[in-house]
Image (cartoon, grey):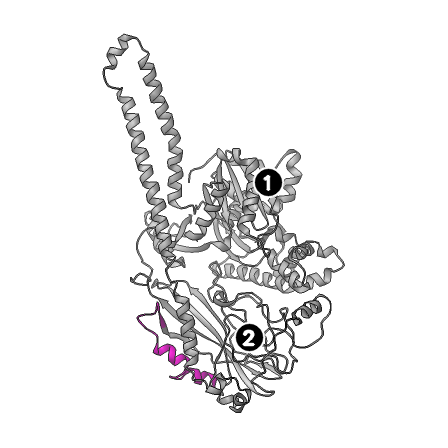
């Protein structure tokens, strides 16, 4: 990567734009300028147009810094959750010439998208043995990088480098702490507005993970808990410890605190288990969310390792009037610091996700200055020759000097090459992107159709599909063949050694048949239908028969008493695909609000009252979308068709309650909803009757949308 003497590092976060300008002096840097511009509203707040808000904030920044940016290298970041990061050890046998081919092959196995739909780069970390090399592979979809570049261009910003925020954190910590190979691992917990990045630096090698939990999650917990506007909840989050409502505020945030601790502990344990001999004894905390009163202390107590605030830098100081202002904002400047370090050539990770075509275009534009200078020099020479004495004219002859002809000819060749490359890059890339928009567009409609067809294969009695409640109840509960879909979701499966792309489909179902496992496995039932229809020419995938799993242990729910589950029954798994998670099989954290195709809500809390049972409706991504309230003794939590939930796990705030008392803001909210209450359907179950809830999963192997093999190619170049 080309280096520069001065560079800007710009982080456009969810709460503010943070920028810092560094000038390199040998192996040291000096801060010459910095700025923090908060957005008028947090980008994740309800009813906010993030792009419009970024344009406004970026416009403010460029209004005062546009001239400074022209001569400096500009490095910007994307959030870790928007990109893919994976680390691997590759055997090179001491020959670094093999590395590019190995990385190219590995990237096609690891990146969970077709390679032609992403921009990717890699970083190799040196190892002492030189037999293996640690490699970090980083990627972002072309659609996402295109959106960002378009937005920046509209504002007048043309970044030279785009990297991911966790890389910048690694660069800042590695440089500022001057970490050496003998130093133990250092973990950085960067708690941002929308997500948290975990970065570990050890022996000059990085490891990182991002998960979608940050300051926004705490604000939403307060907003939902007290039923107050988002802005007021945000203010209460930061000032709650000093208010008379401190205890209530902390109580509303407790589940979010617990989820954050769980993810941090999971990351720490995973790193130590996969790096023999590594023990993380130093944890640094950074990010604007860490300003929440008591959060750092809480993490320290729960993790068992002291969490130090990364609120000052050892190798970076600001002198004069700006010193106090910089110190006050230092905790939020870590990413910008690391970005600027990469810009001046002092970064340990130097990946660049700006598309190759864009980089070439800018390189040609830079050469254009030299073309103009060469042309000007040619004109000057011509003029000097023209005004020479007549004696000189005889030496000139009838044709221009060879130097002028050469310069003009070279300029024309350069311009022709530029026009050809620019046109091919923009038109070819645009055409490819347009074509790729239609890839796999029909997968999800087919999956939904197949799921319902499989459920219908159980051949439910006609009375159960009708509207006569007495006829339904007349059929013995243990003999009913109706299978109800409570939740449906999918997770992309990272390609394995065979390079084949798969999607794991998960169905949370309810049924009351006496032996649910045997019943569903029958030839004329759910699993039987999936096996019989595994391979169909007109469907964009093949159902993998061996992947069909019917649970052995079911959650047994007795109406009026609640749920019973065997101790060895598996917890519900699923949730959004987390490209940076330690393991693709990790269960989703409790309370994560992942609906429908994006994932699941977690194990549903069983009804505490007599009549809140799942009914006839088959809802997608809803926690109970059928029949409802019964005798009205439910507790208003998730788990019944009659008690509507906001999609979080057990203990979440109910939007409609069928019984119980409420006071304050909660009572007011219920009163408002009662104005337009829709009558709830009666339950098809009676007190003492039993039904079962469990998770049926299967995988589908995607066919190539353009007729070729569905496997990711093992050879090729980026």
Coordinates of residue 44 in the picture (x, y in percent) = 57, 55
Q: On the image, numbered disc 1 is attached to which residue? A: 35
The quarter of the displayed image where residue 313 is located: top right
Instruction: Name which of mark 1 and mark 2 comes first in the sequence.
Output: 1
Disc 1: CA contacts within 10 A as few (<14), some (14-19) or many (>=20): some
**Viewer-proximal residue, 547 or 616?**
616
Coordinates of residue 599 in the picture (x, y in percent) = 49, 66
**Viewer-proximal residue, 488 or 131?**
488
**Residue 562 in view here:** yes
Secondary structure under badge 2?
A: loop
**Viewer-proximal residue, 635 or 549?**
635
Task: Decide: is 334 above or below 685.
Answer: above
Residue at 36% x, 49% y is 429
Q: Quadrant of the N terminus?
A: top left
The mark lying in front, picked from 1 and 2, is 2
Magenta-drawn stretch contains 518 = yes
Task: Decide: is 167 above or below 212.
Answer: above
């Amino acid at each position: 990567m080309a280096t520069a003497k001065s560079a800007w590092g710009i982080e456009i976060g969810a709460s503010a734009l943070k920028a810092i300008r560094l000038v390199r002096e040998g192996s040291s840097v000096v801060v010459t300028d910095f700025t923090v511009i908060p957005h008028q509203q947090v980008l994740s707040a309800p009813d906010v147009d993030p792009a419009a808000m970024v344009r406004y904030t970026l416009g403010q920044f460029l209004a005062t810094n546009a001239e400074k940016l022209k001569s400096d290298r500009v490095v910007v970041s994307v959030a870790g959750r928007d990109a893919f990061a994976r680390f691997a050890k590759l055997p090179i046998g001491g020959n670094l010439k093999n590395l590019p081919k190995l990385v190219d092959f590995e990237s096609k196995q690891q990146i969970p998208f077709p390679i032609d739909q992403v921009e990717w780069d890699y970083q190799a970390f040196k190892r002492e043995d030189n037999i293996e090399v640690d490699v970090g592979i980083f990627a972002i979809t072309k659609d996402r990088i295109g959106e960002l570049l378009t937005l920046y261009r509209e504002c007048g910003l043309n970044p030279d480098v785009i990297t991911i925020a966790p890389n910048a954190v690694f660069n800042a910590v590695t440089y500022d702490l001057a970490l050496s190979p003998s130093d133990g691992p250092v973990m950085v917990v960067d708690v941002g507005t929308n997500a948290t990045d975990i970065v570990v630096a050890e022996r000059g090698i990085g490891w990182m993970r991002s998960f979608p939990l940050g300051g926004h999650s705490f604000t939403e917990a307060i907003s939902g808990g007290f039923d107050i506007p988002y802005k007021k909840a945000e203010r209460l989050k930061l000032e709650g410890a000093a208010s008379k409502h401190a205890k209530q505020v902390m109580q509303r945030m407790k589940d979010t605190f617990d989820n954050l601790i769980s993810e941090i502990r999971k990351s720490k344990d995973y790193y130590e288990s996969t790096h023999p001999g590594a023990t993380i004894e130093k944890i640094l905390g950074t990010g604007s969310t860490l300003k929440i009163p008591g959060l750092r202390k809480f993490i320290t107590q729960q993790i068992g390792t002291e969490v130090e605030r990364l609120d000052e830098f050892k190798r970076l100081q600001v002198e004069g009037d700006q010193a106090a202002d910089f110190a006050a904002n230092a905790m939020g400047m870590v990413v910008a610091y690391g970005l600027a370090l990469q810009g001046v050539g002092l970064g340990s990770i130097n990946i660049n996700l700006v598309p190759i075509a864009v980089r070439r275009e800018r390189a040609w534009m830079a050469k254009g200055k030299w073309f103009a200078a060469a042309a000007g020099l040619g004109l000057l020479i011509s003029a000097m020759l023209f005004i020479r004495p007549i004696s000189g004219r005889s030496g000139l002859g009838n044709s221009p000097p060879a130097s002028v002809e050469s310069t003009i000819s070279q300029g024309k060749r350069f311009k022709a090459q530029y026009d050809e490359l620019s046109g091919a890059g923009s038109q070819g890339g645009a055409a490819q992107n347009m074509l790729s928009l239609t890839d796999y567009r029909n997968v999800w409609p087919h999956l939904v159709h197949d799921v319902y067809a499989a459920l219908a294969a159980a051949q439910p009695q006609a009375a159960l599909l009708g509207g006569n409640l007495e006829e339904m109840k007349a059929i013995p509960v243990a003999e009913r063949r109706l299978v109800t879909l409570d939740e449906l979701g999918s997770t992309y499966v990272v390609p394995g050694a065979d390079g084949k792309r798969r999607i794991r489909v998960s169905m949370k179902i309810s049924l009351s048949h006496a032996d649910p496992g045997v019943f569903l496995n029958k030839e004329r039932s759910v699993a039987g239908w999936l096996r019989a229809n595994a391979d169909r020419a007109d469907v964009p995938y093949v159902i993998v028969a061996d992947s069909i799993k019917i649970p052995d242990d079911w959650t047994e729910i007795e109406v009026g008493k609640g749920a019973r589950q065997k101790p060895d029954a598996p917890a519900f798994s699923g949730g959004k695909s987390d490209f940076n998670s330690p393991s693709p099989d990790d269960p989703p954290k409790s309370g994560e609000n992942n609906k429908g195709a994006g994932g699941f809500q977690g194990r549903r809390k069983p009804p505490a009252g007599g009549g809140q049972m799942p009914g006839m409706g088959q809802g997608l991504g809803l926690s109970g979308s059928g029949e409802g309230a019964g005798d009205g003794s439910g507790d208003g939590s998730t788990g019944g068709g009659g008690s509507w939930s906001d999609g979080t796990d057990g203990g979440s705030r109910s939007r409609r309650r069928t019984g119980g008392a409420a006071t304050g803001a909660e009572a007011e909210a219920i009163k408002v909803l009662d104005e337009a209450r829709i009558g709830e359907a009666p339950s098809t179950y009676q007190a003492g009757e039993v039904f079962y809830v469990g998770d049926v999963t299967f995988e589908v192997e995607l066919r190539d949308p353009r007729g070729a093999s569905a496997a990711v190619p093992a050879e090729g170049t980026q």
